[in-house]
Image: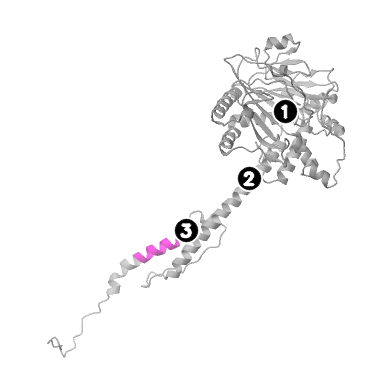
Amino acid sequence: TRSGMNYSPWLVELGGTLEIAADLNPLDQEARQRVCDALMAPIPDEDDLPVATVHYKPCDASSTSTPPYDDVAILKTGMKRKLRDKARFKERRRASRLAEEKRAAVHDSVSRRIKIVSHKIARRVQAMPLSAVDISGAAVARTGFIGRRQPQNASDHRPLTKADAVRLGFQYIEWDGREGRPLLDNASRVFAVLAGSPKDVDGWAQVNHDAQQAFDAARSMYRLEPKQISHRRGSFPAVAAGISFGGGQKHVNNLVHSVHNQGIIGQLLNHPAVQRIAGFGDAAFKLYAPRLHGYYAKTMQTLLEDNATLKPNFRNSVFGCATFNLGPQVITSVHTDHLNLPAGWCAVTSIGDFDPKEGGHLLLWDLNLMIEFPPGSLILIPSAILRHSNTVVRSYERRYSFTQYSAGGLFRWVECGCKSQKEFSAEGGVHSISGTERWLRGIDMWSTWDELQAVWAE
């Protein structure tokens, strides 16, 4: 050879075959198996995803070839598809959950049975007949969907003490804030109720305390506008939330707030104490005015079915809207809530820490009544037609209130076929009854005292 070395002319046979691949095989198999395991590992929550599974070729541990590049590309594409489909699935599930919550919001209130014990307690209540009161002659708008706005003068905004109200000749009504006392008109219809509070005295006192803390926290964080601090109902911060129509709105919508303020309202709506207060208000409404309660429930159900974007405040209440009067000293001026349904009821809950014999009384001006209104108690009134206010509390005391109601515009929207009156009229629509007939139908939905006693006796 060129190197000067000579090869042996003899062929030498080795004792065995040297298999390098066999010597490396265990390590190679282990590495390939790890790759296979990684490729075949399921994506978290994969079983919950409605997606097509990408199938990969099973890895052969005995093979010395490397998995082809195309399989890796398929893996990446499949994972992206799974993530995209998972996001879509979550969005569909969220939308479905919201829809179910809205259906449940009305269903829970309608289907909830009033406890037998409530009927037994109600049978013991003492009604307050007001034979001189003819509610049918109340001031309502021509359409019968809302009340008539009553003018206010300077004296209506003057804070009144208990002594002031006594001098004005108001009839004083003592009330412990626990036992129910229905108010009857000259036709023995229950047109308002001193509904009281649940029998769990200690537990409800804690609810009142927790609500105070929630209202104080909300007042300190909420970015109030000037019109929310000083308004025709008084000079105190008031924040409304819920479904409404009227006052310039073109469609039925949830009241709109800034992102910051909406977060605070959400905390209030989700607060356990507030939800218990709302639920008790709805239950008392159903107990004393079952037909009117059913009308509210049917209207709310129609609204929610027609508009998927609407969100009710609570799943245990048929009222469309609520107002948080955040205190710390809520002293209302003489007013009516004329945009509410005239025959409808407003659920007013007094909250705070004050002596109800010294202040915080509910003044019903058209009835000439001054009613003790203790913290934690509930009163139901047709606030669209009855002028009302409350007396001042002492400087070191605290008073708040929480109200639930439904705007008359909601009922008009539904009666117009889920459109505005303007659209309804433009299409040639004509209402089947007059405004006066609508108003009289409304008060016919109030129960008479005899009717309620018969129902409660069953």
- Calculate the distance from the C-alpha at mark 2 to the C-alpha at mark 3: 30 Å
Location of mark 2 (residue): 98
User: What amino acid does circle 1 point to?
Assistant: Cys
Location of mark 3 (residue): 42
Q: Using the rendered view, name the quadrant where residue 185 is placed.
A: top right
Percent x, y of residue 411: 77, 37
User: What amino acid does circle 2 point to?
Assistant: Leu
Of the pair 324 and 174, the residue shown nearer to us? 324
Q: Which residue sits at x=61%, y=37%?
A: 257
Local SS, label 1: strand
Local SS, label 2: helix
Q: Using the rendered view, name the quadrant where residue 448 is placed.
A: top right
Location of mark 1 (residue): 346
The region drawn magenta spans 31-42
Q: Which residue sits at x=58%, y=51%?
A: 91
Of the pair 403 and 101, the residue shown nearer to us? 403
The C terminus lies in quadrant: top right
Percent x, y of residue 181: 74, 20
Any magenta on residue 167? no
Q: Which residue sits at x=74%, y=43%?
A: 302
Any magenta on residue 36? yes
User: What amino acid does circle 3 point to?
Assistant: Pro
- Total tally of numbered discs in the picture: 3
**Comes first in the chain, label 1 or label 2:** 2
